[in-house]
Every structure is written in structure tokens, then in C-alpha cells.
Image (cartoon, rainbow, N blue to C red):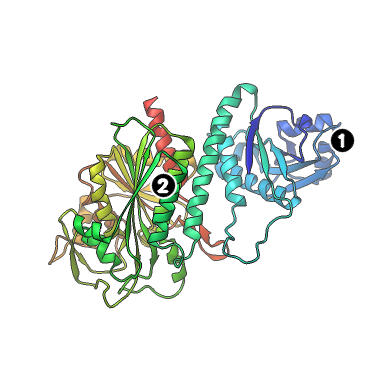
Amino acid sequence: MEYTVKSGSPEKQRSACVVVGVYEPRRLTPAAEEIDAASDGYLSALIRRGDMEGKLGQSLMLTHVPGVLCDRVLLVGMGRERDLNDRGFRQTVALMANRLQEAGAAEAVTYLSNLRVKGRDTVWCVRDTVMTVAQTLYRFDRLKSSKDRPRRPLRKLTVSVPSRRDLPHGERAMAEGVAISEGVSLARDLGNLPGNICTPTYLAEQAQALGQEHRTVKVSVLERADMEKHGMGALLAVARGSRQPPKLIIMEYRGGAKNEKPHALVGKGITFDAGGISLKPGAAMDEMKFDMCGAASVFGTFKACASLGLPMNVVGVVPASENLPDGDACKPGDIVTTMSGQTVEILNTDAEGRLALCDALTYTERYEPQTVIDIATLTGAHIIALGHHAHAVMGNNSPLVNDVLGAGRKAGDRAWELPLWDEYQDQLKSNFADMANIGGRPAGSITAACFLSRFTKQFRWAHLDIAGTAWNSGDNKGATGKPVPLLTQYLLDRLEEKA
């Protein structure tokens, strides 16, 4: 898909389709008014006749509109002007993308980006238009023998800005939108692949491919023997039940000064999670291929960083393994020694993500990072607490947590803070080791973060639990690519602070 930004009158656009909005009740947006004037009242006559109310979800494709140079005009309902918010804007852009695809409009010009959205500016509208269109038109059909592709897919979208002076800002927003969308698509592709293809070795190969594509990304991979030398007893315990060798994947994006300390992203990469000896129920177990979506978001964010050429340093660490039952698998009651030297009593082998992450977090210390964010489909309790709309965030540094929350609000990829009080740490007590790997049913997401906090004393750290947001179930089953928008926005915000 090709995206461009331009300013200009809608009636003068030589295009297969021009897209304008209609507010409820039956009120033309400014761009629609310009077309109406050029067409001698053609649109307002349709509106008066009741063909278009302007409600959210409504659309009307028009052909042979007099006085304009485009082949077609697509009217999209925007709802009431005063109520137009992020969600309503995305709904209309998604509707536009689907209608253009269905109509076989290979290229189009949209004026929806010129509208006022509560609390947002033109830069946000342009970037979000690109991201929403990419998300809407995304398809994962590489493993189907017969692919259902549109006859004439949308190939080029021009996004309007109000005036020529908005063009530089619009072009920057478009570039960010394209880069983030590519990162989201990569994360979705990796998440949607089945466990028999997307193994720890496959993830390592994809990291190396990313390094070959972008010279600013250096990749190294630790094998089982390397993990043993480093004393990564927790990560190795998770891998014992699998015939697939574990990998610790390290990606270094070097866009800043050589001596500049990096920001670190640590992503859980459990490529299939059957629960180990603490076996999961069979229902919906196929969705446990998504248990590496934290790792996928690190890959996606690195792709966005490299595409944008961000002038900063970022390190990504991905502990990759399967978690399966086997005669050699770790058992409830086993005690392991982590890379930090702390011991863990494994009371439930299905609480494996924190075991993989704790050694990865300790390994990350060597980079002396400015900040560390780990991303993991860590707990089903996250879904009970927040549903499927917000990531849970916790951390040991309030300014960092606030930066993560702020990035989520800007990107429309929202998170919500849960407490990380010392009182919760008591739930991890063990009679036989320094800690247990679970703290019981109460506050499961919080106690999981408490566990990780014991391995983050050396740096500013935030934890994102994405168990409820990383994928959709049901008819729309598939990875979402979250939180690539949040993470990329977080890094962009750090650059803005330096400017």
C-alpha cells in the first residue's frame, strides 16, 4: 500500500474516489460542502431526501457526481460532531477502508483526516488514518492454499491535510504511521503463525533476518550451552519439557551515540504453552501459540525504529522456549537457581513466563539501560481485572510508569496501572526457596509482577501484561500486534524530551 499526503480542494482531485464525511443529523462536513457547492447542491439534495443521516456506521457510494473530477464520492457517517472521539474516528476510517476495498477503488483521497477529533491534532489524525487502514486491510492467509483476495485492492491512499503549511507535519505523521503499521503487521504475522512453524529457532531466524534487512540492528543468539554457563536455571527449567531448543535472542538497535545508554525491551517468547506438567485445559489451547506475542511486539517495535531511523539506542531481549509436558519436564515442587542467584520453588509449571523473563531481565543488566520495559502475555488474571481493552502496567519507578501510560494514551493503545505494593510480596513466600513462582488466586497479575520486580533492582523498570490485549478470539481470532504502537510512541516521546 502506498500512502501520500497533500492539501487541496476535494472537487479538484483526479482520483478513483474521494472520501468525505457527513455529521449527524444530515450535516455536511467542510470538504463535503465544497463538493456540494461544485456539484450545484447534489449532496445536499441527497441528504434532504434522507439517503444519508450521518450516523456512525453509515456510508453511501456515489457515482457521476457533477462538477467534480473524481470517478466516485464516498460519504461516511461521522455521528455528532461534538461527540467525535478516537473510537468514532477509527470506526469511520475502518468503514472507509472496507468500502473502498469492496468497490474496487485502487486509489482514493480521504478528507476525514481534516476533521476535528476530541483532544487530537492533524498529526494524530493523519498517523491514525494510516494505521487504521493498515489494520483493517490486514489479512493472514499465507498458509491457505486458496487465497481470497479482492479483484482490485486499494493500492494508494492520499491523506488530506487542511493547508500547505501542514504538509511537513503530515508527512512526518504519515512516515510514523507507515513504520508503526509495518511493525504491527510483523508482530501479527509472528503471532498468527502456528507453533509447529514459529518455534524458538524460527524466532531467532526472524531476528537475524531483521538484522540483515537493517544495518542498524545487530543480532546475537544464546544457545542452551550459553544459558547453562550464565546460570539461567529458570529459563532452562521451562525448556526441559520441549524437544525444541531454547534461544535467548538479543537485538541491538544502534541509532544513537556509541556511549548512549539504551532503552531495553524484554519480550516473553513462549512459542507454545501447554502448561507443562500443570497441563492447561484442552479448550482453546490452540490460542497458546499467541503466548509469544510479547516477543512479537519487540520485533515489531524494532522494525518500526529501524524504518524510522530513530537517533537512539534500543536493546531487545527475547527468552524463547516452548512449555510442554514430558518425562524430563520440571515438576511442581522443583527448585531452580536463577541467573541472579535467587532460588525459586516452582509450584505451578504453567506460571512459566515469569521464569523465562526473570533470567532475561537479569541478563539485561549488562547493557546498563536507561529504562527497561518487559512485555508478556503473563496472566489470565489480567483479563479478569481489565478485560480485553487495556494492558496492565506496573513498575518500580513512577515517572517511567507515567511515561508508559502517556504513550498509550497518545497512541490509542491504552494501559492501566495496577498497584505494586510490598504487601503483595508476602504471597510469594516459600518454605523451601527464596520465593515461589505463584502467589495464589488473589491479585494474580500483581503477584506475577511482584515476582519480576525481584529481578529489577538495578534499573528503572515497567511491566506490561498483555494477556487480554495481544489477540482476539472467536470469529476474529488473531494477533492484534499490540503494544507495538505504545512502545514505539514511548521511544518517540524519549526523543522529544531530548530535543
Q: Position of residue 203 (x, y in %)?
A: 41, 57
The residue sitting at 45% across, 39% down in the picture is 306
Q: Nearer the viewer, residue 437 or 392?
A: 437
- Callout 1 crowding tier (Cα within 10 Å): few <14, some 14–19, many ≥20: some
Q: Secondary structure at mark 2?
A: strand
Q: Tell me the tag on residue 66.
A: 1
Q: For residue 384, say whether it is visible.
A: no
Where 242 sits versus 122, above or below? below
Q: Nearer the viewer, residue 205 or 317?
A: 205
Frontmost of labels 2 and 1 is 1
Q: Secondary structure at mark 1?
A: loop
Q: Quadrant of the C terminus?
A: top left
Q: Relative to residue 184, is residue 207 drawn left or right?
A: left
Q: Position of residue 337 (x, y in %)?
A: 17, 61
Count up the numbered dots. 2
Q: Quadrant of the N terminus?
A: top right
Q: Tell me the tag on residue 361.
A: none
Q: Relative to residue 282, is residue 175 drawn left or right?
A: right
The residue sitting at 83% across, 42% down in the picture is 46
Q: Which residue is mark 2?
A: 415
- Callout 2 crowding tier (Cα within 10 Å): few <14, some 14–19, many ≥20: many
Sequence-wise, which precedes: disc 2 or disc 1?
1
Determine which quarter of the picture holds residue 322: bottom left
Q: Position of residue 50 (x, y in %)?
A: 81, 45
Instruction: Please name the amino acid that badge 1 sits on.
Output: Pro
Q: For residue 247, say whether it is visible.
A: yes
Instruction: Please name the amino acid that badge 2 sits on.
Output: Ala
